[in-house]
Image (cartoon, rainbow, N blue to C red):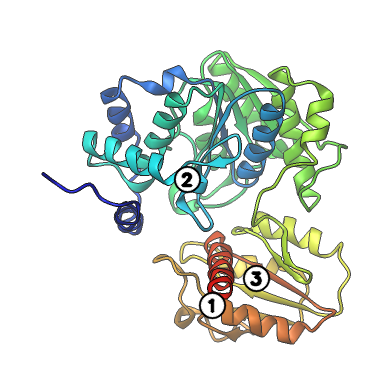
Amino acid sequence: MDVEPTYEEVLNHMNSMEFSGMKLGIERIRDALRLFGNPEKRLKIIHIAGTNGKGSVAAMLSVMLKNAGSRVGMFTSPHLVDVRERIRINGELISKQDFKDLFLEAKAMMSELTFFELVTLMAVLHFVKQKVDRAIFESGLGGTYDATNFQNDHISVITSISLDHMHILGDSVEQIARDKCGIITEGRKVVTTSSNQRVMSIIRDAVEVKGAGLIVAGVTDLDVSLNGAFQKENAGIAVQVAKELGVPDNIIKESLLEVEWPGRAEFIEKNVLIDCAHNPAGVDALKAYVESLEYDKLVIVFAACRNKDYQEMIDRLPDHDRLIFTQSSIERRLPISAVPDDIDCIKIVDPLEALEHAKSLAGENGLVVVCGSIFLVGDIKSALAADLVHDLVS
């Protein structure tokens, strides 16, 4: 009889799956869901696609719906520190035991799934088992061919759209918008943001074809606990969805003051700001926030993935005194050795060493900003958490 693997062994196996890369197409996840009797059809799904802001909108909605009395499942990606961040109920991470059990259950039925497809299936099974009232799913990449595209959304959400993942989704905002619109479900409501004006005709056409209803959200004037003016736009989307679901105005208002979403314009120290900006539009939003702050010097710690337009992101960074280029731990990172010599920067391989050097350069009255890659932010948070644990036990 085979010995059941430990949680750590499951985690190691899943990490090896993640490094093996992605495969486009939704046939595998649909086959897997059929094997389990299409459990996704038992969920009331809010599906969120877009280039930026998906996770923030999901986090806001989760708090609003929970405070209104619902049991809320939330599936997001990628994770920063712990893979269990991807699957939550009412803000709480799935337990290690449940995660391991779901992995064994799903993997036994469908061995050909990619990492993302497997975790998506696990989230569906978990939310059904736990009898959630609402399930929020954030698309991983695009919309039409994303594993989360179950085509039975109760409400579809399209956040701001800009250029990203062009090698997969298309090299124009219009092409990318068409792909995002692939999540729209027949006869259901769609909520988008007024900032998508450039592609609004594409969204309207897709809504009309599906016989859906369109709601265009503006920037909210309500206070939001998350930093940055861009979060007011994300909050505007969340507010409109919550209203469609009958959440009272007072709960919406109170909930926006409770939202936590790590790694998004987050101060991890008094003068250290981390942000998951990983495309030019994300850097623009971060720049606007940084320029609203007061500091003597600005030092930026930056890393990117190989498939990103890192030169464009660097060009859009706020004016800074020094740029430190580092690299994240994932396989598709842009390695230090590939950083062009004509970029005026300091090169430090280890992210934590890069951060410490940035702090020394910025001084007490300066500001350090870490950005360019979600995975860099995750590496920094993981390293700092490991240091804290070491300090506590030593």
Q: Residue at x 59, y 46 (%)?
A: 51
Q: Nearer the viewer, residue 329 or 384?
A: 384
Task: Give the percent coordinates (x, y) of residue 277.
Answer: 64, 58
Residue named by callout 3? 314
**SS type, badge 1:** loop
User: In the drawing, what numbered circle is on residue 191?
Assistant: none
In the rendered structure, which amino acid carries the disc numbered 3? Ile
Local packing at callout 2 (Cα closer than 10 Å; few below 14, some 14-19, many 20+) is many
As drawn, is 283 to the left or to the right of 218? left
- Labels 1 and 2: the sequence-earlier one: 2
Task: Give the percent coordinates (x, y) of residue 257.
Answer: 80, 41
266 to 366, vertically: above or below? above
Task: Give the Cα separation between the discs numbered 1 and 3.
Answer: 40 Å
Mark 1 or mark 3: which is in front?
Answer: 1
Task: Give the percent coordinates (x, y) of residue 245.
Answer: 68, 19
Task: Give the Cα separation between the discs numbered 1 and 2.
Answer: 48 Å
Task: Give the image quarter of residue 150.
Answer: top left
Task: Give the image quarter of residue 36.
Answer: top left
- Labels 3 and 2: the sequence-earlier one: 2
In this orientation, does residue 193 appear? Answer: no
Task: Give the percent coordinates (x, y) of residue 275.
Answer: 66, 60
Q: Residue at x 80, y 59 (%)?
A: 288
- Labels 1 and 3: the sequence-earlier one: 3
In the rendered structure, which amino acid carries the disc numbered 2? Leu
User: From the image, which quarter does the N terminus lie in?
Assistant: top left
Residue named by callout 1? 394
Q: Nearer the viewer, residue 306 or 29?
A: 29
Local packing at callout 1 (Cα closer than 10 Å; few below 14, some 14-19, many 20+) is few
Task: Give the image quarter of residue 53.
Answer: top right
In the rendered structure, which amino acid carries the disc numbered 1? Ser
Q: Nearer the viewer, residue 11 or 223?
A: 11
